[in-house]
Image (cartoon, grey):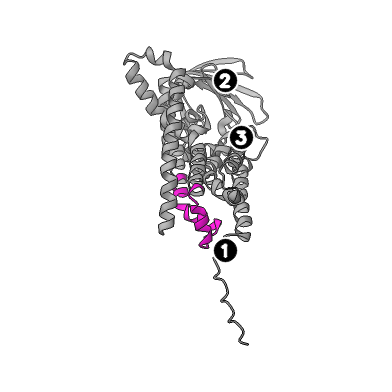
């Protein structure tokens, strides 16, 4: 790594850390005020409960605030370089805008890796602990396909209803199975208070069997029912897709959903998990890509206003695209990758356009012609 690369990366990372710390502090205070009454009622005491809550919420807030912090840190780094005329010296030495972005790749890739690890590992664990705590916005709410305390699922032609509370701990309880013919007609109904998931089947205990065509009721000690439902995946599907790791998203998308929820949200977030990791790096590079256009003004204000406008427009469009992907109005890949690729194309276009007309290496003046002798 060259001296210039180390200087630029260190300049950005220091400002990124300071900005992120400040934004996190403000967001933490607002978040604590929102759940202050619940924390005050905790048996461990308000102080310990607050510290635990902040620790659990930290990965989620980091995931949400990293893109904004990266954009602001990039703007602050550009402002310092402009104020001290360092960018002018860099350009005059023959370093093109595209080269500056290449030199910033170590910091950008560090942001990508940090964002992916936080989203894929830290956020799911924190969300799981917060939902187990049932505090604030993480209290249990029924999800699509869930009525009251039950999950309604589909296994082949059969419709299955099971206790959502039992599924949450990996067990079968209060099971009702509506068995149907290939034509969709109800054939029989099975009711069982308990059951055990085995390999490829559910062993139901104390079964009440109602045969529709014969209008007959039977009492059976146990029934081995072929069911193609993975309880672990059903348990995970009761949570928002954003709180699931990439591996689980891929498993649920491949399982077909069992009729509990639509697959579009999981497919969208499967792509969004990777595309979203690139956003902090692209917003950081946006500031450096814009500065060449306004270099003659010697002012950071035009760069700041343009970068903030473009950055927040992108974040809004990205949220809208993800929402449209989750409801099936956009293809999951388009919803996740469309805004990210558009921002990357904008940064690349700005760099290539400004790099073609400027940042040429300094050319020494031609030697003076010898005076003519009379």
Q: Mark 2 or mark 1: which comes first in sequence?
A: 2
Q: According to the image, label 3 marks what residue?
A: 316
- Residue drawn at (60%, 31%) of the image: 262
Tell which of 235 and 173 is nearer to you: 235
| 102 in the magenta segment | yes
Residue 202 in view (yes/no)? yes
Magenta part of the chain: 83-111
Q: According to the image, label 1 marks what residue?
A: 360
Query: Where's residue 49, x and y in %?
Result: 35, 19
Query: Where's residue 268, x and y in %?
Result: 58, 38
Spot the residue most to the front.
374
In front: mark 3 or mark 1?
1
Disc 2 versus disc 1: distance between alpha carbons?
A: 79 Å
Residue 189: image tag: 2
Task: Name the secondary structure under disc 1.
Answer: loop
Disc 3 versus disc 1: distance between alpha carbons?
A: 37 Å
226 to 70, vertically: above or below: above
Q: Mark 2 or mark 3: which comes first in sequence?
A: 2
81 to 329, vertically: above or below: below
Q: Quadrant of the C terminus?
A: bottom right
Query: Where's residue 123, x and y in %?
Result: 44, 33
Q: What secondary structure is the magenta-colored segment mainly?
A: helix
Residue 124 in view (yes/no)? no
């Amino acid at each position: 790594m060259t001296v210039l690369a180390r200087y630029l990366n260190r300049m950005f990372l220091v400002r990124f850390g300071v900005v992120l710390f400040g934004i996190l502090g403000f967001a933490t205070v607002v978040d604590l005020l929102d759940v202050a009454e619940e924390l005050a009622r905790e048996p461990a005491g308000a102080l310990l409960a607050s510290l635990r809550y902040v620790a659990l919420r930290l990965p989620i807030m980091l995931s949400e605030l990293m893109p904004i912090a990266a954009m602001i840190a990039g703007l602050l780094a550009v402002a310092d370089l402009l104020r001290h005329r360092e960018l002018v010296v860099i350009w005059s030495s023959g370093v093109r805008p595209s080269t500056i972005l290449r030199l910033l790749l170590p910091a950008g890739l560090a942001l990508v890796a940090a964002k992916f690890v936080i989203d894929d590992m830290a956020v799911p664990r924190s969300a799981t602990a917060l939902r187990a705590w049932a505090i604030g916005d993480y209290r249990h709410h029924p999800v699509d396909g869930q009525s009251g305390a039950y999950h309604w699922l589909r296994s082949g032609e059969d419709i299955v209803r099971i206790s959502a509370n039992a599924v949450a701990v990996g067990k079968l309880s209060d099971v009702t199975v509506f068995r149907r013919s290939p034509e969709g007609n109800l054939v029989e109904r099975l009711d069982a208070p308990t059951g055990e998931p085995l390999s490829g089947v559910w062993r139901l205990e104390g079964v009440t069997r109602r045969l529709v065509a014969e209008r007959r009721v039977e009492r059976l000690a146990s029934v081995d029912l072929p069911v193609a439902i993975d309880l672990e995946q059903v348990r995970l599907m009761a949570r928002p897709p954003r709180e699931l790791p990439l591996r689980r998203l891929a498993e649920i998308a491949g399982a077909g959903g069992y009729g509990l929820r639509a697959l579009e949200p999981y497919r969208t977030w499967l792509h969004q998990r990777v595309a979203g990791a690139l956003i902090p790096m692209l917003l950081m590079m946006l500031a450096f890509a814009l500065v060449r256009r306004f270099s003659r003004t010697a002012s950071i204000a035009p760069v700041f206003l343009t970068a903030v406008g473009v950055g927040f427009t992108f974040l809004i469009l990205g949220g809208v695209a993800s929402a449209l992907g989750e409801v099936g109005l956009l293809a999951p890949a388009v919803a996740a990758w469309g805004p990210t690729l558009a921002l990357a194309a904008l940064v690349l276009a700005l760099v290539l356009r400004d790099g073609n007309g400027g940042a040429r290496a300094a050319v020494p003046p031609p030697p003076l012609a010898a005076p003519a002798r009379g």
